Image (cartoon, rainbow, N blue to C red):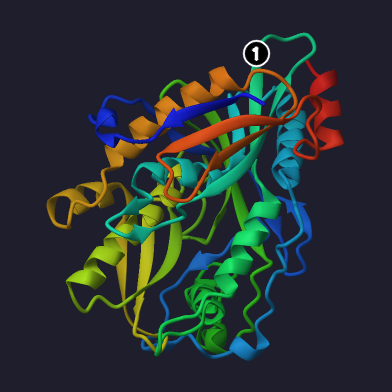
């Protein structure tokens, strides 16, 4: 089958700051509970409250209730939420692309995913399908992660041998979830008891529960609906839907001890920034830990200021404007490339300077679109 390709390199052709960005605005939300049951609404929303320091992120590893994410959930939860929204508003949600925030993060960071030997999500595979209303003009591309590829990559990561003295991949993953538990409350601070606040260290870590925000946003001429997990809210949601929400993203990173550590942290900031930028999360709380998984300090990072700090104060290893301009150009090209139904593969191989798009099934939508969604969209005007 014929393949279309989009060149990532040279990235300097995407320089400048002339791309229009639509501020992400939440239009709906949904939650998963501790048993991974889906519900509309914000029942799993959490509230930021700083952890006590020092914080030992190893405690409770033996009781970790880890989500088995090997099953393919496709876009089902996001599409169910859009159906409910459109029923409530009696209005179709217009967009060019509907996908998870994680897919757009990979695209946004692609220009700098391999620089000076440091690799960040260097390769990816996604599935896409194009849906056209039987009467209305225009089409929407729906993009999901290729689940088989994701599972294969996770297996490779699990089998990686860590350098002497470093914790396992499983343990470091747990540290991230543990830091979240230590930094949130299940209700606002005012009605929360002192015992609940101080008991967070002994709380069983379960990563099945999630609050997911669904936002309308845009980069360049491409209108998008993105769904993604949000860790916590700083205070509370504003009553007016038009007002921005002070979301908080929670991250851990190794303590910076030397120039190499600083460079590695700056590279991590690329992903931190992209994830938060796409959903409109204004604040990132970073817990800096030692090699033993003990957090000794936390830092509040303003999402919008990260690219300029990397440029002016850091090692200038990536450029936010190049990421945005690249994403705008790629998405415009993708809209022109995927204009028929069937299933398409969007692929970037490891260390490759191009993104490939090719058809893997000539017709239909596979399981990317749920029957409920195609039926709903086919019968609404």
Taking 59 as reference, is 43 left or right? right
- Please name whichever residue, 297 or 370, is drawn nearer the observer in this view of the structure: 370
| Quarter of the picture holding the C terminus | top right
Question: How far across and how far down the image is residue 281, in percent?
Answer: 43, 50
Q: For this rendering, which residue is in front, 362 or 96?
A: 362
**Quarter of the image where one finds residue 360:** top right
Residue at position x 36%, y 88% from top?
54
Q: Quadrant of residue 327?
A: top left
Instruction: From the viewer's perspective, tell me whether residue 18 is left or right of residue 109.
Output: left
* Residue 169 shows in the view: yes
Look at the picture and state if 331 lies above or below 133: below
Outermost residue, front direction? 1
Label 1, on which residue? 138
Residue 142 pos. (x, y %):
66, 33
Which residue is depicted at the point 30% across and 69% down? 299
Q: Where's the N terminus, which quadrant? A: top right
Task: Give the residue displayed 59% in from the left and 45% down from the top.
Answer: 125
């Amino acid at each position: 089958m014929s393949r279309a390709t989009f060149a990532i390199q040279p990235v300097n052709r995407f320089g400048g700051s002339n791309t229009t960005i639509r501020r992400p605005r939440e239009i709906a939300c949904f939650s998963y509970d501790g048993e991974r049951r889906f519900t509309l609404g914000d029942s799993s929303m959490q509230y930021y409250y700083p952890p006590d320091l020092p914080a030992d992120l190893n405690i409770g590893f033996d009781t970790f209730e880890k989500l088995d994410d090997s099953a393919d959930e496709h876009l089902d939860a996001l599409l169910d939420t859009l159906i409910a929204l459109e029923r409530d508003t009696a209005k179709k949600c217009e967009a060019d692309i509907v996908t998870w925030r994680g897919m757009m993060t990979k695209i946004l960071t692609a220009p700098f995913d391999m620089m000076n030997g440091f690799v960040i999500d260097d390769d990816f595979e996604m599935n896409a399908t194009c849906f056209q209303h039987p009467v209305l003009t225009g089409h929407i591309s729906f993009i999901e992660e290729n689940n088989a590829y994701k599972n294969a990559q996770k297996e490779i990561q699990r089998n990686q041998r860590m350098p002497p003295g470093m914790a396992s991949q499983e343990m470091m993953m747990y540290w991230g979830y543990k830091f979240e538990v230590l930094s949130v409350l299940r209700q606002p601070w005012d009605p929360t008891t002192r015992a609940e606040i101080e008991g967070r260290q002994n709380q069983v870590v379960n990563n099945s529960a999630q609050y997911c925000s669904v936002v309308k946003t845009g980069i360049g001429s491409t209108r998008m609906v993105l769904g993604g997990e949000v860790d916590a809210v700083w205070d509370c949601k504003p009553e007016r839907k038009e007002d921005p929400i002070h979301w908080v993203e929670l991250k851990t990173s190794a303590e910076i001890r030397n120039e190499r550590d600083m460079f590695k942290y700056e590279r991590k900031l690329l992903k931190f920034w992209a994830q938060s930028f796409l959903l409109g999360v204004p604040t990132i709380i970073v817990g800096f830990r030692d090699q033993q998984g003990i957090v000794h300090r936390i830092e509040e990072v303003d999402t919008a200021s990260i690219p300029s700090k990397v440029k002016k104060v850091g090692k200038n290893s990536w450029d936010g404007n190049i990421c945005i301009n690249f994403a705008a150009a790629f998405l415009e090209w993708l809209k022109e490339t995927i204009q028929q139904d069937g299933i398409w593969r969007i692929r970037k191989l490891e260390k490759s300077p191009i993104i490939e798009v090719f058809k893997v099934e000539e017709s239909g939508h596979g399981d990317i679109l749920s029957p409920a969604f195609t039926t709903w969209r086919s019968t609404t005007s």
